[in-house]
Image (cartoon, helix red, strand yellow):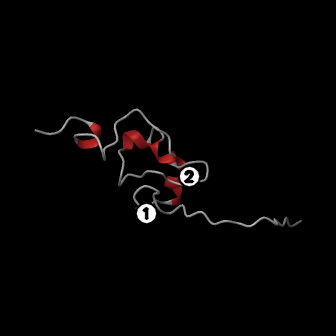
Amino acid sequence: MVCVSLTAWSHVDTSTCLHCDAHVTPRFGRVFGDDRDRAHRCPECDSHRRLSRGSAAGVDVPIPDPEIAAGRHGGEPDV
């Protein structure tokens, strides 16, 4: 039996980060991305600590964003 869908299929590009346009693998999108396997953040633009807590899925996490926080990965700046 063959099932046929009459709805238009919209292609969702899951191969790039929605934040920085860096390449992400399909596996990264499945593991860390949102329910449509899209990566909102990736290792190029965010820390692993934040990614593992949901930032790649678009979740706001309490850990400082390395792009706007002082110091590497949201820590204190090096002196």
Horizontal side of 63 relative to 32 (left or right) equals left
Residue located beneath label 1 in the image:
23
Q: Where is 36 relative to 13, above or below?
A: above
Which residue in the rendered view is the most extreme toward the left?
79
Q: Nearer the viewer, residue 7 or 1?
A: 7
Task: Give the amino acid type for the residue marked by disc 1 in the picture.
Answer: His
Q: Quadrant of residue 12?
A: bottom right
Q: Nearer the viewer, residue 52 or 17?
A: 17
The quarter of the picture where the C terminus appears is top left
Task: Give the amino acid type for the residue marked by disc 2 in the picture.
Answer: Arg
Horizontal side of 47 relative to 26 (left or right) equals left
Horizontal side of 38 relative to 71 (left or right) equals right
Residue drawn at the location 40% of the way across and 32% of the way down:
62
Q: Where is 40 relative to 52, above or below?
A: below
Which residue in the rendered view is the most extreme toward the right?
1
Q: Where is 61 relative to 5, above or below?
A: above
Horizontal side of 42 relative to 11 (left or right) equals left
Q: Secondary structure at mark 1?
A: loop
Q: Quadrant of residue 9?
A: bottom right
Residue drawn at the location 28% of the way across and 40% of the way down:
69
Residue drawn at the location 63% of the way across and 66% of the way down:
11
The quarter of the picture where the N terminus appears is bottom right
Q: What x and y, as percent, mark residue 41?
A: 43, 51
Q: Residues within 10 Å of mark 1 (few under 14, many from 20)?
A: some
Residue located beneath label 2 in the image:
30
